[in-house]
Amino acid sequence: MAEKLRVAIIGSGNIGTDLLAKAGRSPLLEVVGMAGIDPDSAGLARAAAAGVVTSHEGLDDLLEKLDAVDLAYDATSAYAHAEHAEILARHGVIGVDLTPAALGPAVIPAVNLADHVDAPDVNLVTCGAQATVPIVAALAAVTEVPYAEIVSTISASSAGPGTRANIDEFTRSTARALENVGGAERGKAIMLLNPSDPPILMRNTVYADVPEADAEAIAAAVDRVVENVSGYVPGYRLTAPVDISDGVATVLLEVEGAGDFLPEYAGNLDIMTSAAVRVAELHAERRAAS
């Protein structure tokens, strides 16, 4: 059996703790370390209980405690990632960025994962991009998409201070990804926080101009990419057949979380951690094949 890829997690909050569960379950990955800033955090306690090396004194301290690390997830902040990326580069550790820093290329596993396998640092953009860019890319593969607009609605309960503070950056980054990764000539993104109780699942609507639409080809392309994404995000699904009316394709999606650490309604967070695990698994597969 091939040696597992050794991964570390920077950040012991909700995202980092969910990564601990998901990466720890992967047959291709071994979580060897977690760094946080709060010595009493639940994430560090869970990691230590699982036999993972921990540190509350920063990334440098964690790396000094570890024999080797192949890849590190950064689940902290855009500001912190700039420093972390430099440290990881010095140690030859691949960085997978779950913050808005966007220092490395944008990666959406179902669309362009293999294109950036040699990049030292990759960015997972936003939850809205992870959910909708695959759909836009599927449409762009079979027809021209002059304009694509997406609306991501998430439960207010799943939006922490970081999400709320970065909504403008969310819309800009997602719109750029619709264009640069999804293939739309022009993109727009909207994010809504729904305060309902009980909390709703993440819902996404994609509107795309498809002036030369082949309805059967579009439906087939969307079905294929939904199957692809659901392979690493099991709760990702269509909620209605693709509708094409007056040259506009409308695709309705929802994302239900796996419930590993985050609540099941937090599909917006779950799709990010699931994408992060898929990135690391590709590196593990590539190394095993070499």
Image (cartoon, rainbow, N blue to C red):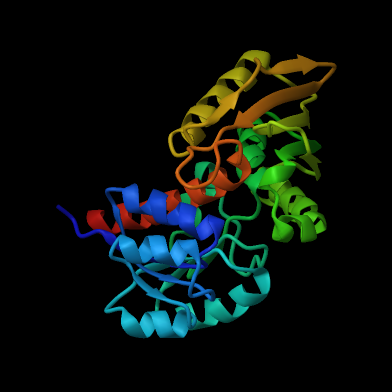
Q: Position of residue 40 (x, y in %)?
A: 49, 71
Picture residue at 51% right of the left edge, 26% below the top: 224
Picture residue at 44% right of the left edge, 39% below the top: 232
Picture residue at 50% right of the left edge, 67% below the top: 41
Picture residue at 66% right of the left edge, 30% below the top: 139
Q: Is residue 49 visible?
A: yes
Which sits in the foreground, 100 or 160?
Answer: 160
Residue pushed farthest left? 1
Q: Quadrant of the C terminus?
A: bottom left
Residue 281 in the image: above or below residue 58: above
Which quarter of the figure has residue 172? bottom right
Q: Position of residue 270 (x, y in %)?
A: 54, 44
Q: Is residue 90 visible?
A: no
Residue 14 in the image: above or below residue 245: below
Which quarter of the figure has residue 152? top right
Residue 93 in the image: above or below residue 225: below
